[in-house]
Image (cartoon, rainbow, N blue to C red):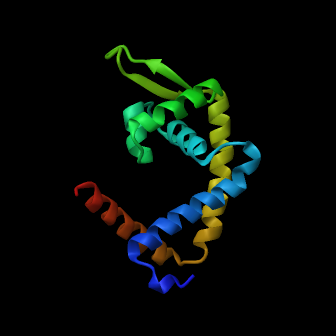
Amino acid sequence: MDYAKLSFSHLLHLTAHQWRLAVDRRLKDLGMSQASWVAVAAIAGNETPLSQKELARQLGIESATLVPLINRLVEQNLVQRVLTPEDKRVRLLVATEQGQALYQKVKVVADELRQEVLTSISEEEQTVTRDVLTRLLKAAETK
């Protein structure tokens, strides 16, 4: 593939896609789909419980798409829904003990992969790339 001929957005999309596939390959022995481990990681890695709406926003998917995924995670005893005393309509998502254990495994694998991949660019390039991606994300969120 001639990377120089790819548009910026296509290159960005393919990079994110290949990154997820690389993590998937490393996690295949856990029997988890990419969507499942990303959701569990977001829930378990968050300091406070997330609502389904907040999780959907973090994952960049529609709430309607998220519901079947959350249902599967609840059935697998990785996540539980917790009622809030403030609003009985809102259910917060909390990782179970099994979900936290899975998150720790995923985190180790993802951290190792990140280190391996990022050795291809300098610390300075990593900082610049992160700054640029953050600005692009903020700009895209407002459009």
Q: Residue at x 73, y 50 (%)?
A: 28
Q: Is residue 59 left or right of residue 89?
A: right
Would residue 66 be seen by someone viewing this image from the given angle? yes
Q: Residue at x 51, y 36 (%)?
A: 43
For residue 100, what is the image quadrant? top right
The quarter of the rendered structure image containing the N terminus is bottom right
- Number of marks drawn: 0
Q: Residue at x 26, y 62 (%)?
A: 139
Q: Pick whichever, 124 or 34, lies toward us.
A: 34
Q: Is residue 21 left or right of residue 137?
A: right
Q: Is residue 30 left or right of residue 124?
A: right
Q: Residue furthest right?
A: 29
The quarter of the rendered structure image containing the C terminus is bottom left
Vertical order, 47 against 27 (above or below)? above
Would residue 127 be seen by someone viewing this image from the given angle? no
Q: Whole-percent x and y of residue 70?
A: 53, 31
Q: Whole-percent x and y of residue 81?
A: 50, 22
Q: Pick whichever, 124 or 131, lies toward us.
A: 131
Q: Whole-percent x and y of residue 111?
A: 62, 57
Q: Residue at x 66, y 54 (%)?
A: 24
Q: Whole-percent x and y of residue 132?
A: 36, 70
For residue 92, what is the image quadrant? top left
Q: Residue furthest left?
A: 143
